[in-house]
Image: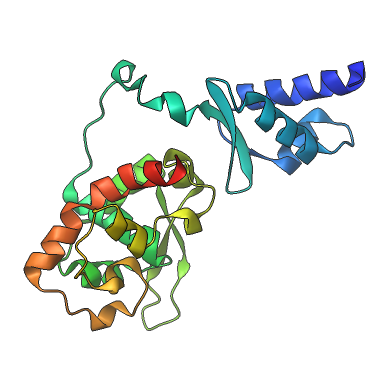
Amino acid sequence: MKNKDIEIKNLVEAILFAASEPLDVETIKEKVGIKIDISKILKNLQEEYSSKGINLYEISNKWSFRTSEKLSDKIKSHVIEQKKLSRAAIETLAIIAYHQPVTRAEIEEIRGVSFSSGTLEILFELGWVKPQGRKEIPGKPLLYVTTDIFLSHFNLKNISDLPNLDELKSAGLVDARIDKSIFGTEKFAKSDLNKDSKENIFSNIDNMLTSSISEKQN
């Protein structure tokens, strides 16, 4: 590799380290200021860091350095424990992730119970959920979707990487009798869940959004 190529690679590396958020290829090109194959450099850096404590990840077409998944469990003890999300927030997040775009009324129909505006505000503050457009029905209610920050937090490249129902069943995280509608694979309006089975599925949502995703990537 020529000295100039090494300098450019080092510059891209430094830009990514200094960035406060994941960067897309176009943004990196603008910062480098030279016409060059940035994608190739990113792939080389990704391979170079693959065996190190810090890895280069591509999340929703954006790139950032993150702690290696292999070491994440070992450094958990050094991370300040955060207060867990409320059950309502976990359920709401899971429904939005699997049904997006989805309205508040649809979330409440799937959950079978209404929730306060504070639940969505918590997810907004975390940066995991955002409003995106309105549904073309009477009243034009807001539609909610997950964000790139959500993908980044759970180490997902795309929302399609969320574990599907079969994977969750195989991991023992959901009851085999549950209605597929909870995960957006059938019209939720036809849900035949009884109260107890719905309680069981939502009691496992927290594990679904953490353990299950980690197991899938390892």
* Image quarter in which the N terminus is found: top right
- Is 106 rendered above or below residue 124? below
Name the image colouring: rainbow
Left or right side of 147 for 50: right
**Residue 118 visible in rendering:** no
> Residue at point 39% right, 41% down?
214
Q: How many marks?
A: 0
Whether residue 135 can be seen here: yes
Quarter of the view holding residue 131: bottom left
The one of 105 and 184 positioned closer to us in this rendering: 184
Dividing the picture into quarters, in which one does residue 54 lie? top right
> As rendered, which of 24 and 209 lies closer to the eye?
209
Q: Position of residue 213 (x, y in %)?
A: 38, 46
Q: Residue furthest left?
A: 196
Rendered view: 210 above or below 44: below
* Residue plotted at (48% across, 46% down): 156
Is residue 167 shown left or right of residue 182? Answer: right
Please state the horizontal and vertical placement of residue 108, each as a whole percent of the image.
Answer: 22, 68
Quarter of the picture containing the C terminus is: top left
Q: Quick check: 22 left or right of 215?
A: right
Residue at 20% of width from left, 52% of height from top? 204
Q: Is residue 46 left or right of residue 202?
A: right
Residue 16: x and y, percent? 65, 27
